[in-house]
């Protein structure tokens, strides 16, 4: 990806698709060399791994058209599928979503947090349990989870006492 910016400009770029679980990267470009280095960093995008709240969707009814909702991207919220702020300090941000003016009677909202079409369930949870187990078993922070990840390990999705 090529981003053209003015000298000494600060640009915020969101890599990946639709933002769920992706960190925002600030690019501070002052020369062509630093711009090229920033472009390399963008391509290496860092993916945060959320906690899986449930392997399946929430069926949500009676949403008011035009109402703004914040979908939980971290998996820690006790008000699933919506955000309650538990993500603070993890690198995650809630996803803002507006209920369409022509609402559906039922929305299938993702609870596994790995959907590629947030906040909607896309069936990703079907093959997810084995992938999550593998990620947690091979996590580079596995031996330090209790001390290094008091809330959530963003490398593998491990959560203490979940």
Image: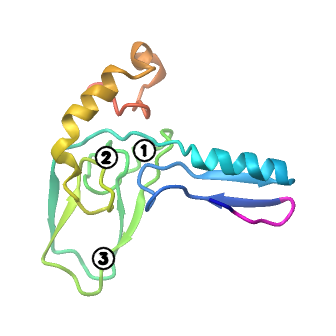
Residue depicted at 71% across the width and 61% down the height: 11
Q: Residue at x 27, y 82 (%)?
A: 65
Identify the residue shown where x is 42% and y is 25%. Answer: 150
Q: Establish if 37 lies above or below 68.
A: above
Q: Main secondary structure of the magenta part?
A: loop
Distance in Å between CA atoms under marks 1 and 3: 22 Å
Residue 45 location (% of width, % of height): 55, 45
Residue stretch rendered in magenta on the structure: 3-8
Q: Quick check: marks 2 and 1 in contact, CB under 8 Å?
A: yes
Calculate the distance from the C-alpha at mark 3 to the C-alpha at mark 2.
20 Å
State the mark number for residue 17.
none
Compared to residue 162, the image places residue 65 above or below, namely below
Side of 112 where 29 appears, left or right: right
Q: Residues within 10 Å of mark 1 (few under 14, many from 20)?
A: many
- Residue at which label 1 appears: 87
Q: Which residue is mark 3?
A: 99
Label 2's element? loop
Q: In front: mark 3 or mark 2?
A: 3
Image-quadrant location for residue 57: bottom left
Q: Quadrant of residue 4?
A: bottom right
Alpha carbon distance from label 2 to label 1: 8 Å
């Amino acid at each position: 990806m090529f981003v053209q910016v003015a000298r000494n400009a600060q640009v915020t770029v969101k890599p990946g698709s639709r933002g769920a679980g992706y960190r925002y990267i600030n690019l501070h470009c002052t020369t062509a060399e630093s711009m090229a280095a920033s472009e390399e960093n963008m391509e290496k995008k860092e993916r945060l791994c959320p906690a899986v709240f449930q392997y399946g969707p929430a069926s949500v009814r009676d949403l008011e058209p035009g109402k703004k909702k914040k979908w939980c991207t971290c998996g820690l919220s006790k008000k699933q599928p919506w955000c309650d702020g538990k993500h603070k300090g993890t690198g995650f941000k809630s996803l803002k979503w507006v209920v369409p003016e022509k609402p559906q009677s039922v929305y299938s909202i993702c609870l596994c947090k790995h959907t590629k079409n947030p906040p909607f369930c896309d069936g990703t949870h079907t093959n997810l349990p084995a992938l999550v187990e593998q990620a947690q078993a091979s996590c580079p922070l596995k031996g330090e989870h209790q001390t290094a990840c008091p809330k959530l390990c963003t490398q593998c999705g491990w959560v203490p006492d979940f």
